[in-house]
Amino acid sequence: MIKKKISINNNKINFKKSKFVITKNTHFIFILLFLIPPIITMSLRCFSMTLNEPLYEGMLVKGKLNTDEKIWFNKRQIVPHSNGVFYFGIPQGHTDTLILQYEKHTPTEIIKTQKKFEVKQQRWKETKINGLQKNKVNISTKNQERIKKENILLNEKRTEYNKDFFPICFTRPIPSKKYRISGDFGARRILNGITGSGHSGTDYAAPTGTPIISPADGIIVVAHNDMFLSGKTILINHGYGIFSSYSHLSKISVQSGKHIKRGEKIGEVGSTGRSTGPHLHFTLTWFNIRVDPEQVFNNYPCIVSE
């Protein structure tokens, strides 16, 4: 604090030399002025991202970012909704450390770094399926080419990005309790005695004609009446990389390009394609990474009265 003394002698005003005096208050102010810049700098450099841990292979992860932050997983940028919420999928078999690349924009610099997360291993079941038609297991060269083309169609559609929708929560595609899970996600399948790959989705056994609903808002991007393996098939783009597919249907109630709401009927359970009985083979993906549907329904449920 600066103090200036004034005296009046013989009608003259004398100004004495100014003196700087440090009081308790000015001492406190100086401490604040010294500390505030580093505190601001540290806060600008901190990342605010949160994830719903623990993380497992085959998991759809939900998290949140600030608007000045960006992240990437496996070289793909994870784009959040306007509220900062985002999803990304961890592939089945990814039991190594998960690394997310960060980028944060401050008024003076762009900060780049990475953060590592532990991914826990799942215990996958083994499922034996007998009674399949031989031509559905020992597939001819001609049908292998057909399967390849159909998979290319589905995989290409799963690369399309859409920001018109964002799934806040998910409902099961068969809302009633009149089903049983006949095939678990990730289970190693043995088809007519031949060991196959891990199961890409969840099978819900239900009577033919059981209504199937969309678990979230979206747009129909595939409505195919006859695929070799999956029969009558539907693929829905739910936005921000989230897709759901429905196989072995007896009836398709929607057309490609239709916008649908969560809970809207899209088809009926059947046994078309490679199937031994009426059921819905349901798949959820983040782009082309398949995730466990039951984990999604349990972690991000919508409150629905049935």
Image (spheres, grey):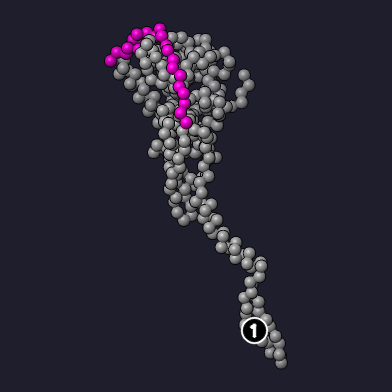
| Image quarter hosting the N terminus | bottom right
Which residue lies under the disc numbered 1?
Answer: 16
Q: Give the residue drawn at x 49%, y 39%.
A: 80
**Residue 156 picture location, percent across and down:** 37, 28
Q: Which residues are magenta?
A: 120-141
Query: For this view, does 147 lie left or right of residue 239?
Result: left
Q: How many marks?
A: 1
Mark 1 crowdedness (10 Å alpha carbons): few <14, some 14-19, many ≥20:
few
Point out residue 293 in the picture as x, y percentages from the top left corner: 50, 24
The amino acid beneath tag 1 is: Lys
Q: Nearer the viewer, residue 258 or 145?
A: 145
Image height of 296 relative to 250, above or below? below
Q: Quadrant of the C terminus?
A: top right
**Secondary element at image label 1:** loop
- Tell me the residue at 47%/36% (across/down): 118
Q: Is residue 256 visible in the rendered structure shown here?
A: no
Residue 207 showing in the rendered view: yes
* Residue 280 or residue 47, whichever sits in front: 47
Q: Nearer the viewer, residue 119 or 75?
A: 119
Seen in the picture, residue 15 relative to 240 is either above or below; the reply is: below
Q: Residue at x 52, y 10 (%)?
A: 207
Q: Residue at x 37, y 11 (%)?
A: 193
Q: In the rendered view, would you say 91 is above or below 232?
A: below
What is the x, y in percent for residue 287?
42, 30
Depth check: give the residue in front, 256 or 110: 110
Residue 136 is inside the magenta segment: yes
Q: Residue 135, located in which quarter of the rendered image?
A: top left
Residue 134, image x and y in percent?
34, 8
